[in-house]
């Protein structure tokens, strides 16, 4: 399985077969309770990511693909922290399990999926739904995670994720 992730406080994920078939997608959220510190919420997020890596149906992914957080400009310090914390947790877990991590800049992902590297969230959602004939409503986090996967399979030689 290939796991693709959109990092952030609400993060989208998608599982793919090695030949590019979308198997499952969703959004994981972290509570925004006022009584929780940011550190407690980051711990909650880390536990959710661990569950992604240990999913009994999907197994440990053979490859993890994420947006390159070094090129993403965030509007707030908190958003930057969340994106970095999510990314760091994913990379750390992947590393401890010997799973390679591949990163792509968001502009390349958007260009690959929509034809426009600066595409809006609604356009990314629409193009993802069209490309995969997804009838149900999806949110921008799910669409971003799926877009990461679509880009990965468009620019990756066959069987690279087959370990």
Image (cartoon, helix red, strand yellow):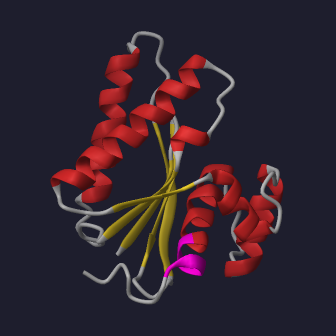
Residue 11 in the image: above or below residue 94? above
Left or right: residue 63 versus residue 22 is left
Report x, y in % for residue 135: 72, 75
Q: Name the residue: 77% across, 51% down.
A: 121
Left or right: residue 46 versus residue 104 is: left
Foreground residue among 152 and 50: 152
Give the left or right position of residue 100, taking residue 65 as reference: left
Range covered by the magenta-colored residues: 152-156
Residue 34: say if magenta. Answer: no
Location of residue 87 in the rendering, given as x and y in whole percent from the top left corner:
41, 42
Total marks placed = 0
Q: Which quadrant would residue 72 be assigned to in this image?
A: top right
The quarter in which the C terminus is drawn is: bottom left
Left or right: residue 26 compared with residue 74? left
Q: 80 or 32, which is in the foreground?
A: 80
Residue at the spot 19% in from the left edge and 61% down from the top edge? 98
Rendered view: 143 above or below 35: below
- Corner quadrant of residue 1: bottom left
Percent x, y of residue 11? 51, 45
Residue 11, above or below 83: below
What residue is drawn where x is 68% and y is 75%?
134
Foreground of the two, 103 or 32: 103
Q: Residue at x 38, y 14 (%)?
A: 36
């Amino acid at each position: 399985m290939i796991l693709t992730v959109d990092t952030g406080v609400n993060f989208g994920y998608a599982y793919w077969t090695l030949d590019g078939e979308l198997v499952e997608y969703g959004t994981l959220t972290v509570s925004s309770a006022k009584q929780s510190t940011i550190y407690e919420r980051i711990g909650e997020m880390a536990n959710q990511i661990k569950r992604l890596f240990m999913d009994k149906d999907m197994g440990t992914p053979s490859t993890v693909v994420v947006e390159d957080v070094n090129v993403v400009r965030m509007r707030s310090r908190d958003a930057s922290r969340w994106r970095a914390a999510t990314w760091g947790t994913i990379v750390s877990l992947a590393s401890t399990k010997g799973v390679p991590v591949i990163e792509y800049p968001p502009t390349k992902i958007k260009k690959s999926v929509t034809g426009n590297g600066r595409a809006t969230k609604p356009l990314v959602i629409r193009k993802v739904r069209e490309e995969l004939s997804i009838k149900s409503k999806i949110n921008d986090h799910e669409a971003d995670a799926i877009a990461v996967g679509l880009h990965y399979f468009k620019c990756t030689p066959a069987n690279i994720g087959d370990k």
